Image (cartoon, rainbow, N blue to C red):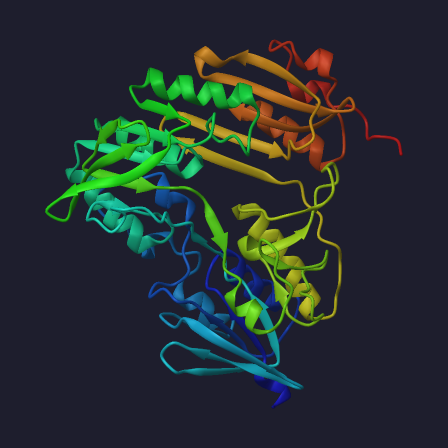
């Protein structure tokens, strides 16, 4: 295989585009091919769950880059081609799409992302039942919501709550059905979970916790509601199922790469073969957070996709640098803006600033006396202060932080002494 067959990036998503851009920024002049299964140019996904009430979703308006940019960077963007087979050989390999196209490569990057977790229940095939991961699904959901009166959201994670909040703000009758004892329980502490439950209730959304879904009901091929294990029937014209995602690892498995809740990579973004890289939602990596509790994890966020792709691009070029970042996330739920700085796993103390009933507060997380994360509700100044402190490996004293009259940025301590 010719040495100049260049880099193939499988997955035209945030991480895939950033990988291509980073290769060029690092001076790589060899061919780059970026292949995506969707017919659109790569686009932003977070807005899909946040603004569904205009009737249509314009993927072009959400595009990361213009068509001219790909041309100027000499990046061959191929859309509408799903890679279904990968083969490796001594000089690189070849990828084959569902349409039969073959793409030769010397270097391979996997930015395959994640797919929605689908429920295996009676009625999920009915018209009016939706999942949300891509622009086509968002477009269908937006059309359904425009005509709906009653909406049921199965899953009380961030995607589900964002759609629920938007639907309720648009005047729909909304019910959120969450199987766990609290909302977004894997991401935030009980205090923040309880805030979201109360806040959505105040806005008129019904929230059912520990909801066991038996089946989806329908008539004439159209969904009519959700039946719970106790016999309760929740009427709905539209049902959104948002119960998480699964990393896309099928192609990695074809190459014999290690897979465990994602494609296993090292701190440089390299897969188990030492040649292929994987970045973004699909990758299972060593915890990159300096104040994290160790172990391995998958991160699903725009900031992570960007920074991890930069590290992976460098590794492809033989410039290995350990991936380190301060994770941060956000969720817009109508008039509620949540911003999270850091990772709260392993916390042993929390500090509440502000008033949850006023929809403006922050919950700070500490471990062994050091701040490790914060959930900030409509409190951008607190978020920026904590984000800055964590990025610089500095602390904010817990006792002083409890006073909401004191600005957190004034409490940022000097760098920690090691």
Pinpoint residue 307: horizontal percent, then vertical percent.
Answer: 62, 52
Name the quadrant of the C terminus: top right
Going by the picture, which residue comes out furthest to the front?
230
385 or 188: nearer the viewer: 188
297 or 13: nearer the viewer: 297
From what the image shows, is residue 80 above or below residue 201? below
From what the image shows, is residue 42 above or below residue 201? below
Counting labels gives 0
290 or 70: nearer the viewer: 290
Quadrant in the picture for residue 390: top right
Pinpoint residue 384: horizontal percent, then vertical percent.
Answer: 60, 29
- The residue at the point 63 percent across, 68 percent down is 257
221 or 47: nearer the viewer: 221
Left/right placement of residue 238 relative to residue 212 reads: left
Going by the picture, which residue comes out furthest to the right?
418
Left/right placement of residue 98 relative to residue 21 reads: left
Pinpoint residue 51: horizontal percent, then vertical percent.
Answer: 32, 39
- Res. 165 visible in picture: no
- The residue at the point 38 percent across, 70 percent down is 79
Left/right placement of residue 354 relative to residue 349 reads: left
């Amino acid at each position: 295989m010719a040495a100049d067959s260049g880099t193939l990036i499988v997955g035209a998503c945030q991480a895939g585009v950033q990988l291509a851009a980073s290769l060029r920024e690092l001076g790589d002049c060899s061919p780059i091919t970026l292949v995506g299964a969707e017919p659109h140019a790569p686009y932003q996904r977070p807005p899909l769950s946040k603004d569904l009430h205009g009737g249509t979703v314009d993927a072009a308006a959400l595009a990361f880059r213009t068509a001219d940019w790909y041309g100027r960077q000499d990046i061959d963007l191929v859309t509408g081609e799903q890679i279904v087979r990968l083969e490796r050989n001594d000089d690189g390999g070849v990828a084959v799409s569902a349409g039969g196209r073959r793409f030769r490569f010397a270097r391979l990057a996997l930015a395959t992302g994640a797919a929605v977790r689908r429920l295996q229940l009676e009625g999920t095939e009915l018209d009016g039942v939706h999942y949300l991961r891509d622009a086509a699904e968002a477009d269908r959901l937006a059309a359904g919501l425009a005509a709906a009166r009653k909406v049921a959201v199965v899953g009380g994670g961030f995607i589900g709550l964002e759609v629920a909040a938007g639907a309720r703000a648009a005047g729909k009758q909304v019910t959120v059905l969450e199987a766990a004892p609290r909302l977004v329980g894997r991401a935030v502490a009980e205090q923040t979970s309880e805030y979201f439950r109360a806040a959505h209730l105040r806005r008129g959304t019904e929230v059912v916790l520990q909801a066991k879904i038996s089946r989806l009901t329908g008539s004439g091929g159209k969904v009519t509601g959700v039946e719970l294990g106790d016999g309760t029937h929740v009427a709905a014209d539209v049902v959104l199922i948002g119960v998480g995602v699964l990393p896309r690892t099928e192609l990695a498995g074809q190459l014999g790469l290690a897979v465990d809740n994602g494609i296993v990579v090292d701190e440089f973004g390299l897969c188990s073969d030492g040649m292929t890289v994987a970045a973004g939602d699909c990758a299972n990596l060593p915890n990159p957070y300096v104040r994290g509790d160790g172990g391995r994890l998958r991160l699903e966020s725009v900031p992570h996709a960007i920074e991890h792709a930069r590290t992976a691009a460098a590794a492809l070029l033989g410039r290995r640098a350990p991936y380190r970042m301060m994770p941060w996330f956000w969720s817009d739920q109508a008039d509620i803006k949540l911003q999270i700085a850091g990772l709260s796993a392993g916390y042993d103390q929390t500090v509440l600033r502000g008033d949850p009933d006023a929809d403006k507060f922050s919950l700070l997380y500490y471990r062994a006396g050091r701040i490790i994360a914060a959930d900030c509700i409509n409190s951008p100044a607190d978020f920026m202060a904590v984000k800055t402190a964590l990025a610089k490996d500095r602390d904010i004293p817990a006792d002083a932080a409890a006073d909401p009259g004191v600005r957190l940025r004034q409490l940022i301590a000097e760098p920690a002494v090691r």
